[in-house]
Every structure is written in structure tokens, then in C-alpha cells.
Amino acid sequence: MKKILILGAKGNLGGQLIKVFSKKNEVIAWDREEIDITDKELIYKKVSDIKPDIIINAAAYNAVDKCEEDENEFELAKKLNCQAVGYLAEAAISVNSILVHYSSDYVFGGHANKTNSEQIKRIKKQGGFKEDDNPDPVNKYGESKFMGERELISRSGKGLKWYLIRTSKLFGPKGESEVAKPSFFDIMLKLAKEKEVLDVVDEEMSCFTYTPDLAKATRKLIESDMGYGIYHIVNEGPCAWYQAAKELFGIAGINITVNPVSGDKFPRPAKRPSYSVLLNTKFEQLRSWQEALREYLKIKNL
């Protein structure tokens, strides 16, 4: 039995992590009510008090557009996605814990926007971004996540035992937190009750990830004693938003017209990567996102 600390416990992923890790482990689940991860001294004290074997950080700032247009929000993003990761890493070293941290496909994306497209051609040919490809974020949120990655990586060889899991487009049961965001699929289902025609962006090629699958994979990664480092964990099969919406309504048997549109139709403060497919070369492949979506819709009785 291991003692496992889960941070961001009331979030969409945090709730699934609790379910998966509670079997034969002692789980300590903290959310914002229990700890402020931007408070360095508080982190050190509370982690030192409980001395967990594993710390899983599912807490993060993810308001992509707010972060882009408001400097105060960007500062908050850096505190949560970067500085806090450094504090957790130092705390983990002090009590000899394993630290698991999640990052995003949004650390990539700048490659496709540059005039020299040879690199993105190579990446598309290989099927996506590998774990050791160089990040190049296209927005401030992605920049904050990349900064957090560097906090972990900089402590390699300094006593930190770490797993960095990059993932993307999470969906699944909603967490208990009042700030837990609905997934793309939940938003589409809600809109389908209100409209007969939907315009959906036919861009931003990436991979969907089902939170119960990600939680199970996280446990398997740790328990299989695979080497520390960076892992890409997503459900199989990249797609754009339009394709995902069509699949959703097809599985759910919802009769609605879906039109593919350019991202220009929905202007947003932050640029999105046009291509940020994560290629998993190190961990066992997860099932397709379509199969995972079918399971999720059964849970929702659709």
C-alpha cells in the first residue's frame, strides 16, 4: 500500500485519479480548500507532515483566453503552472516522493505557424510530436505549461523522481469543483438541445483523452516501474473539432446539421495550435477516442 497525495482532487481528472488510486492505497485528496500550491512554505510543511510516497499534481490554470489578454491572469498562470511545480518538485525531493505532473499538447504549435515548414512536415510524417521533440508554444497558456515542464526537467539528476505526462482535449465525467470546465462533448450536447444547426471549427488537429483512461494509465505507468521522464498519453486517433462533433452526434443518434467552418468565424484572444497531435512512442497505446466516447455516452444514458 502506498500513500498518495492527489492535488486538484475536485477537478475533472482529479476525481478519476481518486477512483483509480483508492484501490489498495491510502489516498489523500486535496483541492484549493486544503492547500494553495502557490504558497511555497505551506507546500513544504504539508508535504513534510504527511510524507507521501507519490504526489500527483492534477491542479492547473487552464483559462487559455483570459491568460492571453490579461497580464494579471498570465501571472497567475505562471504561478500555478510553473512556480508551483518547482515548489512541489523541491518538496518531493525533501521527502523522497515520486512527482507526477500533467502538461499539455499546447506546448507545441508554433512549428506550423513558421515560414520554414520542413519541421512540421517531418512531424506530420512521423504521426505527431514525439516525447523528445522540442516544444514551441503558440500562446501564453502553452508558454506557462512549458515553463512548468522545465521546472521538472531542471531537477533531473538532483534527486527528483518524476513523470511528466502530456495529454490533450480531456473529456469525461465532470469534477466536483465549481470551476471544473465542461468538455467539448458536453458543450456540443448542450448546444444540440438549443439549436438545429451548429457551426464547428474544422481545424486544430489534436487527440482527445478520456479522463478515466488517463487515470488508469497513470497508475499503470507508476506501477510498471517504467523509467522516469516524459510520456504522451492520449486516446488513439487524431481529429479536428468538426470530425469529433459529427462522431458524437452519430453515436448519440442526435439529428442535427453540423457545418465545418474556419476558426476565423470564432475569433479568440489566444491562438490555437493548428496541429498538436501527441505521438505516444513509450507507453502502451490507449483505445480509440471513439470507443471511449461510446462508453462515456453510455454513462450519460445517451
Image: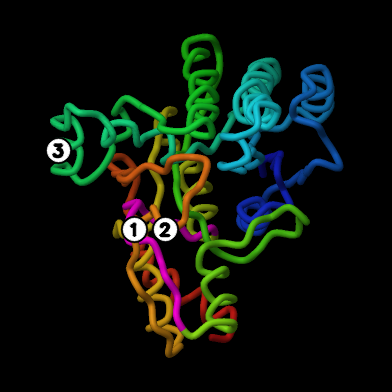
The part of the chain drawn in magenta is 197-211
Q: Position of residue 84 (x, y in %)?
A: 67, 25
For image coordinates 32% across by 45% down, the residue present is: 274
- Residue, disc 2: 265
Looking at the image, do the residues carrying marks 1 and 2 touch, with CB atoms under 8 Å apart?
A: yes
Question: How many other residues sit within 10 Å of disc 1, few (<14), some (14-19) or many (≥20)?
Answer: few
283 within the magenta span: no
Relative vertical location of residue 93 with respect to residue 105 in this rendering, above or below: above
**Nearest-to-viewer mark from 1 and 3:** 1
For image coordinates 61% across by 30% down, the residue present is: 81
The kind of secondary structure element at disc 1 is loop
The kind of secondary structure element at disc 2 is helix
Question: How many other residues sit within 10 Å of disc 3, few (<14), some (14-19) or many (≥20)?
Answer: some
Quarter of the image for residue 56 reads top right
Image side of residue 147 versus residue 174, left or right: left
Looking at the image, do the residues carrying marks 1 and 3 touch, with CB atoms under 8 Å apart?
A: no
Relative vertical location of residue 300 with respect to residue 89 in this rendering, above or below: below
- Residue, disc 3: 121
Q: What is the residue that sits farthest to the top in this orientation? A: 158
Q: Which badge, 3 or 2, comes first in the chain's sequence?
A: 3
For image coordinates 57% across by 70% down, the residue present is: 186
- Residue, disc 1: 262
- Does residue 23 show up? no
The amino acid at mark 1 is Ser
